Image (cartoon, rainbow, N blue to C red):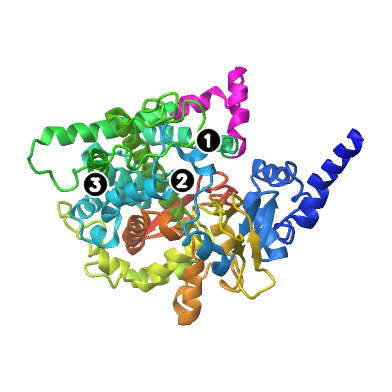
Amino acid sequence: MFALLITAYIGYHFLIYPFLISPLRHVPRAHWSVPVPYVGSCWILYQRYQSRNNAVTHEAHLKHGPIVRLGDNEISVNCYEGGIKSIYAGGWLKHEWYPRQFANFGVMNMFSTVGHNPHAQKKRIMANIYSKSFLQSSPQVQANSQRLLKDRFLPLIEALANSGEEADIHEINNAFTMDFMTAYQFGISQSTNFTQNAEVRKKYLHLYHSRRDWQFISSEIPPFFRKMLQRLGVSLYPAFIHKANEWLEDWSKSMCDAADQYLRSLEGSSTNAGDEPLVFKQFKTGLLSLRQKDPTAGLEVHPHLDEGMNFTRGLTSSNKIIPDEHTTLLEVYSDMVDQLAAGHETSGLALTYLYYELAKHPEIQDRLHAGLTSLSPQITWPPSDASASLNLPSTKSIDSLPYLHATIMETLRLHAPIPGMQPRITPSTPGGVSLGPPGTKHHYTGLPANIRVSAMAYTLHKIPEVFPDPESFNPDRWLNSSEEHLTEMNRHFWAFGSGGRMCIGRHLAMQEIKLIVAAVFTNYRVEIAEGGDVGIEEVDAYTTRPRSGKLVVRMMRR
């Protein structure tokens, strides 16, 4: 009798309920095993371990439509109505995947925060200095742009053009975007100088990227399993990962401390243009002010951080928040390193693939150059008088160039720096939630709470009905489409995400990329060196990169 009950339970739990009763049973499956409890997620986990998540998810959508079940408790969406509009504009909570992956210094930052209120409270502190209107009129950004281009970047490009030397433009792009980002965060006198200091930038890039092959462990292996192994003295990470993390955190902390010391040294005096640690100052001052009004404002404790990766200095054993000045400072460090990493890497990637596409399409490169010559004043380098300052056009005039904008939009569409999934969880709603375009056979209702759901730029940007011939690089699609079709493309354009958790630095990134492209392609042409694009194909990951980690080019004067 007991054996019969066990058999009945197993049959119901593993076969009858998941295949015949579950509210998820009608959602198309990416793999036959998907509905089976505990086993159904093994298929997609294996694909992620093999770095194939983006590709297999895209293939599943091509085969099954806009809503696909990837695991026993996971769904991927690839549509606007009933998809990203419902999930991301609807404010569904972030999945625990974020705090597993993006906590720094043992504390949560704005990006890894799951809850709406803690995120919104921190976002309000910085929203104005990342707004488009502020950035376009900011003396800080203008001064940084002048100095970084005139003293560092353009002399390097000119030297390469004069010598005919081949160069890894991917490394150079990452160097400049790091300098640009840290100058805005910490002031140019406290920022990096990767453009001129090759030794330091090579060390940073090596340590930063050395951890990438191990991110599957932190993002997908259940924390309880990792903690159990830790208690047994077994680490899933090699020792160099911990050393790399420590070096990177110490390195970024040193810039925060230098910026803090600089502010203390002013004693009410004014700063030189570009030297103010604008982001650091705004966030630290705002967070301290917020905590004076409400000691728990902006704080979030999450149970899925690793041991030693929670608010270790701000919590009691009962997990109650006891914020102090040290905890607040760790949060500042955590947010600064998160913005530093995201701000330089994504822009650097976008520039690399823009160079790549322009080198492959010289006719597009020439058309872009022709549009850039309409700027007044033109960004001319080198200036006729070596002592002359670099005269830049207004950021608004650069921003308004239609073909420049179209070329960058097309680069971000075809080569989204963050093509990977952005997981959320379904909310608890009476009657369940719905996914899929209403009025179609792909509309699914009654879905329960706590299902992991996600969309990806990788799949959204390849929907042929929205982006015809999606694998082709065609800036004209952003210029020649009807108003209705352009609206659809913009709805599905997801290089910066959407909704309330959309990338806060998107306007800074676009302004920076447009400035660099305008400065370079007004004066130079780019060609791929022989064999220079071997390995340029993108790694299948949350944040992509060239498989070879480089793009070797030659720069030539116009």
Q: Nearer the viewer, mark 3 or mark 2?
A: 2
Mark found first going from the N terminus, 3 or 2: 2
Residue extending furthest toward the bottom: 482
Q: Which residue is mark 3?
A: 151
Q: Position of residue 331 (x, y in %)?
A: 34, 36
Q: Which residue is mark 2?
A: 114
Residue depicted at x 26% and y 43%: 290
Q: Which residue is mark 1?
A: 304
245 relative to 284, above or below: above
> What is the CA distance from the residue labelled 1 to the residue labelled 3?
45 Å
In the image, is 369 to the left or to the right of 386? right
The disc labelled 2 sits on which kind of residue?
A: Val
The disc labelled 1 sits on which kind of residue?
A: His
Quadrant (top left/top right/bottom left/bottom right) for the C terminus: bottom left
The disc labelled 3 sits on which kind of residue?
A: Asp
Rendering quarter of residue 185? top left
Q: Is residue 32 visible?
A: no
Secondary structure at numbered mark 1: loop
Q: Which residues are magenta?
A: 220-245
Secondary structure at numbered mark 2: loop
Q: Nearer the viewer, residue 294 or 248?
A: 294
Quadrant (top left/top right/bottom left/bottom right) for the N terminus: top right
> What is the CA distance from the residue labelled 1 to the residue labelled 2?
11 Å
